[in-house]
Image (cartoon, grey):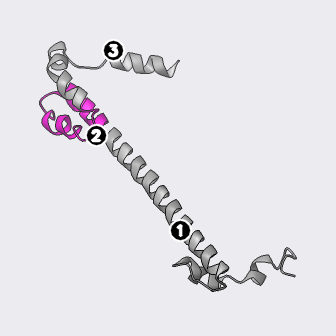
Amino acid sequence: MDPLEDQYEYAESAPFTEDEIEDGKTLAVLAYIPFLCFIPFVKAKGKNEFAYHHGKQGLLLFLFEVIIVLVMLSWKVAILLASVAALAGMIYALMGKIWKVPYIGDLADRLDKTKIFEHTGLND
């Protein structure tokens, strides 16, 4: 069976009365608007199951969106910091100086090239 048909059948067989649907439509629409999704989740609980159902989905969708934005921002920040560190490293190298990249420099000091590449023959 086609998954879209399953969704259509679910939408058609939802156990809500016509009055409940009509009364809850406004709150149900708010459920899918970021930050406003909390309104139907809080106000419709126990009062309108149609709006509450959409409120639960809208809230989880909003939380998913927030997580995605935070992940995207953290990657942008990480790339920016790595680019700045790489540029600073290039400048210090051109000046003939040693510079320890914060956090990474300490790890690099522990790195022993001979132990890593001893089985490859690349340490010659």
Relative to residue 76, is residue 24 drawn left or right? Answer: left
Circle 1 residue? 84
Label 1 to label 2: alpha-carbon separation:
37 Å
Q: Is residue 10 above or below residue 59?
A: above
- Under mark 3, the amino acid is Glu
Q: Which residues are magenta?
A: 31-58
The question of residue 40 being in magenta is answered with: yes
Specify the quadrant of the image occupied by residue 122: bottom right
44 or 112, nearer to the observer: 112
Horizontal and vertical percent position of residue 110: 63, 85
Determine the residue positioned at 21% across, 40% down: 38
The question of residue 120 being in magenta is answered with: no
* Mark 1 or 3, nearer chain start: 3
Circle 2 residue? 59
Q: Around disc 2, counting alpha carbons within 10 Å, would you say few (fewer than 14), some (14 to 19), or many (20 or more)?
A: many
50 or 113, nearer to the observer: 113
Q: Around disc 3, counting alpha carbons within 10 Å, would you say few (fewer than 14), some (14 to 19), or many (20 or more)?
A: few
Circle 3 residue? 12
* Mark 2 or 3, nearer chain start: 3
Residue 3, which numbered label?
A: none
Label 2 to label 3: alpha-carbon separation:
23 Å
Q: Secondary structure at mark 1?
A: helix
Determine the residue positioned at 58% across, 81% down: 105
Q: Is residue 50 above or below residue 120?
A: above
- Under mark 1, the amino acid is Val
